[in-house]
Image: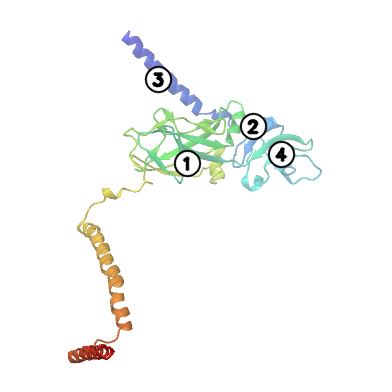
């Protein structure tokens, strides 16, 4: 029974891994084959456009952004070899949309300017890592979200999706080609947005704590080499810190090392406040009335004691005389 379980487990693992590889690698032999009314992108070279009706020496025309055939052509291109056609950025930039085969004016193919961006998600806590929250908690399960118009390559015969590579570089300079059994190279993107799901288990010892960078790129038919533009064939990079604690949260003051200077500063502050209050407030409220109001309204005191006694005796004599005269 145990032997059967081991065999089944190994078979299931091999099947799962093989399925991931098949989903991740589009058929390269037909990636350059463009169907009638298909879509091509700036920078692609070596394209076979014979299925669109274009032959050697054929002319194709662009009538403007609206894509409608008018009497005035905005641009005309001669195709020398329809089995080896180059969508040159110098020739086709700014001329996206429908291109028509002359002289019939039948629709040959569409030209598009590629777009490509990648986002990093924490699936454990369900949030996106951005410039304002560039922290991935160590131990969480993470993954990626690809946003692009290159998914239209999936309409080409035998192609499961546009081959997009996610470049993940760790703090030690190591670039990861896979995360466990999930390959990061030539991911077949057949829709937008397309998420990888939780494929990165950051708790593994394979991923050290520190700063990571992530970007996505697509070099289908050498388009990245011919058109290396950020946001087009190369995404904007995402930089974040993978560690246990959030680097955006300030360290509590209680965790500061207490040096002699710090202790002196913290213990002297209350003394300074108390001394200032005690010496300034009473001095201005108690002494001012005694020194300024009383001397200003009272006559100067007399310092001769004898004069006071004579005044009292004189007053008594006058009073006695008045009382005697009334009798």
Asked if the residue under mark 4 is in contact with the one under mark 1, i.e. CB atoms within 8 Å, the reply is no
Tell me, yes or no, if residue 57 can be seen here: no
Q: Is residue 183 above or below residue 94?
A: above
- Front residue (pair 82, 36): 36
Residue, far top: 1
Q: Which mark is residue 34?
A: 2
Which residue: 44% across, 19% down? Answer: 15
Observer able to see residue 151: yes
Residue matched to label 1: 215
Q: Which residue is mark 4?
A: 99
Q: Which quadrant of the structure image shows residue 292?
A: bottom left
Q: CA distance from mark 3 to mark 4?
A: 47 Å
| Residue at 27% in and 66% down | 276
- Of badges 2 and 3, nearer the viewer stands 3
Earlier-in-chain disc, 1 versus 4: 4
Mark 3 sits on what residue? Answer: 13
Question: In front: 6, or 31?
Answer: 6
In primary-sequence order, the first of circles 2 and 3 is 3
What is the CA distance from the residue labelled 1 to the residue labelled 2? 28 Å
Per the image, label 3 sits on a secondary structure element best described as helix
Q: Is residue 175 left or right of residue 285?
A: right
The label number, if any, that marks residue 180 in the structure image: none
Q: Nearer the viewer, mark 3 or mark 4?
A: 3
Q: Give the crowd class for mark 1: few <14, some 14-19, many >=20 residues within 10 Å.
A: many
Crowdedness of circle 2 by 10 Å Cα count: few (<14), some, many (20+)? many
Question: Disc 2 to disc 3, how far (Cα)?
Answer: 36 Å
Q: Position of residue 177 (x, y in %)?
A: 42, 34
Specify the quadrant that holds the C terminus. Answer: bottom left
Disc 1 and disc 3: Cα gap in Å?
29 Å
- Is residue 140 positioned above or below 74 on the image? above
């Amino acid at each position: 029974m145990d032997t059967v379980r081991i065999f089944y487990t190994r078979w299931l693992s091999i099947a799962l891994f093989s399925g991931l590889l098949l989903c991740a690698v589009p058929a390269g032999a037909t990636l350059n084959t463009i169907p009638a009314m298909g879509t091509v992108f700036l920078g692609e070279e070596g394209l076979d456009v014979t299925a669109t009706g274009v032959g050697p020496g054929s002319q194709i025309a662009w009538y403007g952004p609206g894509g409608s055939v008018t009497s005035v052509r905005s641009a005309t291109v001669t195709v020398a070899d329809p089995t080896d056609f180059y969508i040159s950025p110098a020739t086709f930039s700014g001329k996206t949309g429908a291109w028509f085969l002359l002289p019939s004016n039948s629709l040959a193919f569409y030209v598009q300017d590629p777009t490509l961006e990648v986002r990093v998600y924490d699936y454990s806590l369900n949030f996106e890592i951005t410039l304002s929250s560039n922290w991935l908690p160590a131990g969480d399960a993470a993954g990626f979200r690809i946003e692009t118009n290159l998914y239209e390559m999936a309409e080409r015969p035998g192609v499961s999706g546009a081959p997009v590579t996610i470049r993940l570089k760790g703090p030690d300079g190591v670039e990861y080609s896979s995360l466990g059994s999930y390959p990061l190279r030539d991911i077949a993107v057949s829709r937008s947005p397309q998420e990888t799901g939780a494929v990165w288990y950051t708790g593994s010892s394979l991923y050290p704590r520190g700063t990571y960078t992530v970007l996505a790129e697509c070099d289908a038919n050498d388009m990245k080499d011919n058109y290396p533009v950020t946001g087009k064939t190369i995404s904007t990079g995402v930089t974040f810190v993978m560690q246990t604690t959030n680097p955006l949260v300030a360290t509590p003051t209680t965790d500061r090392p207490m040096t002699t200077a710090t202790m002196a500063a913290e213990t002297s502050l209350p003394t300074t406040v108390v001394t200032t209050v005690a010496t300034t407030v009473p001095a201005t409220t108690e002494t001012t009335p005694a020194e300024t109001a009383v001397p200003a309204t009272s006559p100067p005191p007399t310092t001769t004691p004898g004069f006071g006694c004579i005044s009292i005796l004189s007053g008594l004599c006058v009073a006695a005389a008045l009382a005697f005269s009334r009798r």
